[in-house]
Image: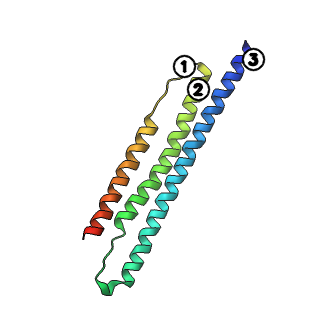
Amino acid sequence: MSEERNETKLREHLANERTFLAWIRTSIALMGLGFVIVKFGLFLKEVATMLEDLNITFSEDFSAKVGTGMVTLGVILAFFAYFQYKKVETQINRQTYKSSSLISVVLTLFVVICGFLLVVHLLTGIII
């Protein structure tokens, strides 16, 4: 019976580690996307500068803020993922596991808000 419990505990720890690695991949993806958004904003500013004779203006501030925010979220998410991983590891060892969705809620809200702001920004750029 002890061997069966050890196997179960091992599976739980491995699942916890896979979840941690998935959160780390998500944080890296957010940081990469944020970086691309900032750099694409700089590219658009250069294009607008070249087309200045056509009275096209562009402000990189918005994309720089959103991109920097996403990079920041990626870093924060990596810290949250580590602390969640250690918390679940302790709970598994003590057999007191309780699920927590704080990371999921924070990530979802931030991505939805950033996406909404990007849509508004893009639509105002099209309408104006």
Image coordinates of residue 65 in percent, x first then y, are: 38, 60
Q: Which amino acid does label 1 sit on?
A: Thr
User: How are the residues colored?
Assistant: rainbow
Q: Which mark is residue 117?
A: none
Disc with the residue nearer the chain's start (3 vs 2): 3
For marks 2 and 1, give the CA distance: 8 Å
- Per the model, the C-alpha gap separating discs 3 and 2 is 20 Å
Secondary element at image label 1: loop
Specify the amino acid type for callout 2: Thr
Residue type of the residue flagged with mark 3 = Glu
For label 2, the residue is 90
Check disc 3: other Cα within 10 Å, few if <14, some if 14-19, many if 20+: few
For image coordinates 44% across by 65% down, the residue present is: 38
For the residue carrying disc 1, how many other residues have a C-alpha within 10 Å: few (<14), some (14-19), or many (20+)? few
Q: In this view, does 101 lie above or below 109?
A: above
Mark 2 vs mark 1: in front: 1
Q: Residue at x 52, y 58 (%)?
A: 32
On residue 3, which mark appears?
A: 3
Q: Distance between the residues labelled 3 and 1?
A: 20 Å
Q: In which quarter of the image is the C terminus?
A: bottom left
Whichever of callouts 2 and 1 sits on the residue coming sooner in the sequence is: 2
Residue closest to the far right: 3
Question: Which residue sits at x=35%, y=59%?
Answer: 118
For residue 53, side relative to residue 27 (left or right): left
Given residues 122 and 92, the one toward you in this image is 122
> Of tags 3 and 2, which is closer to the observer?
3
Tag 1 residue:
96
**Label 2 crowd bin: few (<14), some (14–19), many (20+), radius 10 Å:** some
Looking at the image, residue 122 lies above or below residue 88: below
Q: Is mark 2 on a helix, strand or loop?
A: helix
- List x then y, in percent, for residue 68: 43, 59
